[in-house]
Amino acid sequence: MSAVHPLAALSLLSTAVLSPAVPARDLPERFEATFVLEAAETTIARTRWSLSPATGGRYVSTSRTEPAGVFALISNDTRVERSEWTYAGDWLQPLAYHYEQTGRKARRIGITFDWKVNVARHESPDGTWKLPVPPGTMDKFNYILALMRDLGRGNRRVEYPIADGGRLRRYVLTGIGEERIETALGTFDTIVVRRKRENSKRQTTLWCARELGFLPVKIVHLERDGKTITLHIESLDGIERREP
């Protein structure tokens, strides 16, 4: 099963480039969504993504991916991502990020952010190191929430600095159009957003539903070899449908 996160798997028609430092609190306090992952029109996994408030003004975003369909019979691999963050003015400020994979390719990665000195400390099986990070940096999970927020404000091209893989990367997401699509939850008007990697054929396309606060309801991840993994929303609690 490919190591693709639905919401890394998870930022559009205008050309404005935004700093992450814009008012942020037009996001839901909590929600839980499930997605079905398909490859070659075959269900391979399910992902549950949740957002909830924690103590001290903090929030926790969690994603858990487990095999499904026939793949559940041959694999017990699970992947869990957890992002702890807070609002710092208009910025979704990451505090800690954790990734854990169990099964045949077990792996654990952790990042803690020290904003007093603007450093991210990475821990992985390959070692521990520190990465200087400027204010406005996010982790590779909570930027999806920033994308939802910024789409709601009419921005159609956004750019985020991301602490990812021991490096500071820039995620650029551009709106490439609008599309009305059918989902398990009904029909939605979506903004279609694409993140294309530099010097690579890999790209991720997201269909973000206006009526759900621009939550992605479909994601297609294209790999270097031309293979794709598609995520379809299956259920949602905590976000009520609003007509645009």
Image (cartoon, rainbow, N blue to C red):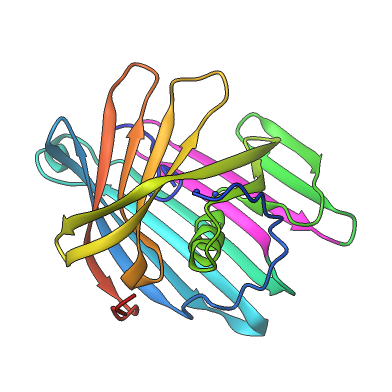
Across and down, in percent, residue 92 comes to: 65, 65
Taking the magenta stretch, the answer to whether it contains residue 112 is yes
Please indicate whether residue 97 sits to the left or right of residue 189 in the image: right
Q: Quadrant of residue 217?
A: bottom left
Q: Residue furthest right?
A: 117
The residue segment tinted magenta is 92-115
Q: Quadrant of residue 42?
A: top left
Please indicate whether residue 82 sits to the left or right of residue 135 in the image: left
Is 189 placed above or below 57 here? above
Q: Quadrant of residue 31?
A: bottom left
What residue is shown at x 12% (from left), y 35% (from top)?
Answer: 41
Across and down, in percent, residue 243 comes to: 29, 78
Magenta stretch, overall SS: strand
Q: Residue furthest front?
A: 14
Is 59 placed above or below 203 here? below
Please indicate whether residue 40 sits to the left or right of residue 227 in the image: left
Taking the magenta stretch, the answer to whether it contains residue 131 is no
What residue is shown at x 69% (from left), y 35% (from top)?
Answer: 166
Q: Which of 110 and 167 is in front in this view?
A: 167
